[in-house]
Amino acid sequence: MITAVLTSDNHLGAYSARYRPEKLELRRKTLCKAFACVVDSAIERKADLFLHAGDLFDRPDPRNEERQFVASELCRLRNAGIPVFAIAGKHDTPKS
């Protein structure tokens, strides 16, 4: 039996002009925490693979803070021996 962990639509680095800066930062931290929980779960369950089905980031040019966070989470999966497969969603792909 193969154990796979599937996630999508994490929208890391989400932005909304209607949020005050402190609320926006809290939302971004919450989204990162949720993604880290999925990675934790994959590692705890000794998943055979980790699948991301699009929209990891909220925009095609994420901030360095989110890029660094994702790199560290992917490193955790690699260190646990869990291969990662991902496809881009409409928020991850440049419009042109």
Image (cartoon, rainbow, N blue to C red):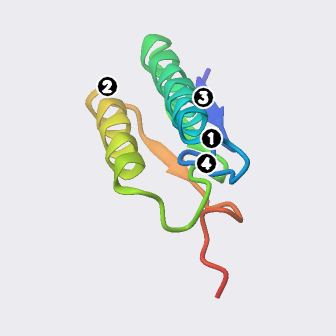
Disc 3 residue type (three-letter): Val
**What residue did someone put label 4 on?**
14
**Distance between mark 4 and mark 3 Cα atoms:** 23 Å
**Closer to the camera, 80 or 14?**
14
Q: Earlier in the sequence, mark 1 or mark 3?
A: 3
Q: In the image as oriented, which residue stretches furthest toward the left?
A: 79
Q: Secondary structure under badge 1?
A: loop
**Distance between mark 1 and mark 3 Cα atoms:** 34 Å
Q: Quadrant of residue 77?
A: top left
**Distance between mark 3 and mark 2 Cα atoms:** 14 Å
- Residue 20 is tagged as 1
The percent coordinates of residue 50 (x first, y second) are 52, 36
Disc 2 residue type (three-letter): Ala
Disc 1 residue type (three-letter): Arg
Q: Residue at x 67, y 81 (%)?
A: 95
Disc 4 residue type (three-letter): Ala
